[in-house]
Amino acid sequence: MKCPNCGNIVPNGFLCPSCGVDTYIFKKARNASIRLYNDGLEAALAQDLSAAATLLEQSILFDKNNYQARNLLGLVYAETGRMADALKHWIVSNSLVSENNPAAGYIEYLQKHAREMDQYNDAVRLYNQALHYLHQGSDDLAIIQLKKSLDLSPGFIDANNLMTLCCLMEHNEKRAQHFIDAVLRKDVNNPIALRYSQELGKERRGSVGKQKKRASGAEVAQGISVKKQIVRLLCPAINVLKRKKLAHWNIVI
Amino acid sequence: MLNFKEELKKYQPLMELDDIQSALQPSQMQDLLDILQHIAKENKPQDPSASQAEEA
C-alpha cells in the first residue's frame, strides 16, 4: 500500500515506516475533509454563508492541506467583510499549492486594490472599537463607530448584527429591521439575524396587542360618548313627546 | 426580551491585517492528524533497551 502522506510503500499494517502517519486515519480524515468541503460548497451556493463557513472550518480541521477548502473559506469571509481572515487562508493555500491556484489571483487583486483593502480593514477596526465601547457601557460611542464601519463596508455582517442588537436595546424597531434585512439578503440563514428577527416579531405582537387593547378602550369610550350625544339630541324630542302625552292626559310637568 | 450582556458575549473581536503574521504561525495551524500524532508521541511507551542503557 502507498502512503497517502509521503508516497512511500507501507509493507504491513497501516503505519508508514517513512513518515510515521497512520494511513487508515489519514484516509478517513481526508475523506471527511472532502465531504465537509462539498457540503460547504453547497451551502455557499445556497447563500447560507454562516453554514458554509462552519463546514469549511471543519473541513480544514480534518485536513489543513485542503487548499480548495481554504480558497472557498476565504471567499466566504471576504463576502462577509472579514478580509484579514480571507487573506490568511489564501496565503496558506498559495503556500501549499503555488501552481494553478486561484488563491494567487485573489491575493494579487487585494495587492492591486490596496485602498479597498484598507477600507475593509478600517471597518473591522471600527467594529472592534465599537465592541470595546459596548463592553465599557458607552453605547452612543459604539453606535457612532458601527455607523462608520458600515459606511466603509455595508455588507459587514458582524457589524450589521451588532448594530441590530443596539437598535433592539433602544427599541428602535424600524432601524433594527433594516439591519436584519441587510444581513439576511447576504446570508439567508444567519442564526443571529434570524434570532433577532424572531425577537422583533415578539415585540411587535406585544405592541400590536397593546394597541388593540388601547383601541378597544377608545372604541368603548367613543361608543359611550356617541350614546351620550344621541341621548342629548333626542332629549328635546323626548321632552316634547312627554309634554304632548301629558297634555293629552291634561297634566302639566 | 434579549439580555444585552449575554448577547454581547457572543461577539468576539475580529482579526485585522496587522494580526495576520501571528496567525500564520505553524502552532496556530494544526489539524486533526497533528493532534493525533502529538497524542501518539506522548503515549508512546519508552524503549526498554534505551532505559537499560541509561541504567548501565
Image (cartoon, grey):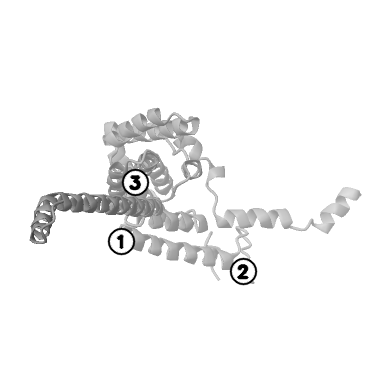
The amino acid type found where label 3 is placed reads: Thr
In the picture, measured across the screen, residue A207 lies left or right of residue A247, that is right
- The residue under label 3 is A80
**Label 1: chain letter:** A
Is residue A99 something that shows in the picture? no
- Residue A175, by quadrant, is top left
Q: Percent position (x, y) of residue A12?
A: 64, 72
Task: Please determine whether, in this image, residue B21 is positioned above or below residue A15.
Answer: above
For the residue pair A190 and A197, the one nearer the viewer reads as A197
- The residue under label 2 is A14
Task: Please determine whether, in this image, residue A187 is positioned above or below residue A126.
Answer: below
Q: Percent position (x, y) of residue A174?
A: 28, 44
Give the residue at the far right of this rendering.
B56
The amino acid type found where label 2 is placed reads: Phe
User: Which residue is found at the position 86% from the left and 51% from the top?
Assistant: B53
Residue A46 is labelled as: 1
User: Which residue is found at the position 63% from the left and 59% from the top?
Assistant: A20
User: Which residue is found at the position 45% from the left and 30% from the top?
Assistant: A133
